């Protein structure tokens, strides 16, 4: 069950990471709420997208190498 939750979380992260890179204007309202004291910008959304994709690939490598 823990592996299922991890895999679903990774897939959601992959979707939001790619969306942040390809269509940052679609995520602008959500980031406007999440980053309340600061202004959401395309640059910040793309940076978060890159970080999420990096985390996705690190977790994917961990699962592949350890064979969980």
Image (tube, rainbow, N blue to C red):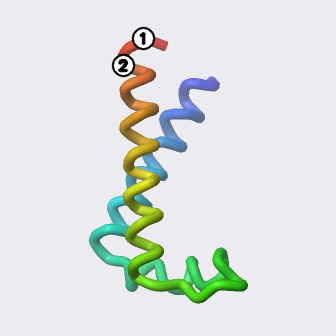
Which corner quadrant of the image does residue 62 belong to? top left
Residue 55 x/y as whole percent = 46, 43
Count how many numbered circles sit on residues in the image.
2
Q: Which mark is residue 64?
A: 2
Q: Is 44 above or below relative to 55?
A: below
Q: Secondary structure at mark 2?
A: helix
Relative depth, front residue between 68 and 44: 44
Q: Which mark is residue 12?
A: none
Relative depth, front residue between 21 and 44: 44
Residue 24 x/y as whole percent = 37, 78
Q: Residue at coordinates 36% horizontally, 67% vertically from top-left? A: 19
Which corner quadrant of the image does residue 59 belong to? top left
Q: Residue at coordinates 47% horizontally, 42% vertically from top-left? A: 10
Horizontal side of residue 36 vs 68, given as left or right: right
Q: Secondary structure at mark 1?
A: loop
Q: Residue at coordinates 42% horizontally, 11% vertically from top-left? A: 67
Asked if the residues shown at circle 2 and circle 1 are in contact, with their CB atoms under 8 angstroms apart, the answer is yes
Classed neighbour count for the residue bearing mark 2: other residues with Cα under 10 Å, few (<14), some (14–19), many (≥20)? few
Q: Which mark is residue 67?
A: 1
Which quarter of the figure is the N terminus placed in? top right
Q: Residue at coordinates 37% horizontally, 14% vertically from top-left? A: 65
Classed neighbour count for the residue bearing mark 1: other residues with Cα under 10 Å, few (<14), some (14–19), many (≥20)? few
Residue 53 x/y as whole percent = 38, 50
Residue sitting at the far left? 22
Q: Is 16 above or below relative to 13?
A: below
How far apart are the alpha carbons under marks 2 and 1?
5 Å
Residue sitting at the far right? 37
Q: Is 60 above or below relative to 27?
A: above
Horizontal side of residue 30 vs 25, given as left or right: right
Residue 29 x/y as whole percent = 54, 86
């Amino acid at each position: 069950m823990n592996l299922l939750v991890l895999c679903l979380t990774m897939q959601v992260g992959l979707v939001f990471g790619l969306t942040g890179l390809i269509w940052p204007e679609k995520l602008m309202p959500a980031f406007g709420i999440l980053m309340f004291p600061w202004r959401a910008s395309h640059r910040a959304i793309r940076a978060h997208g890159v970080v999420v994709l990096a985390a996705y690939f690190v977790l994917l490598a961990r699962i592949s190498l350890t064979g969980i």
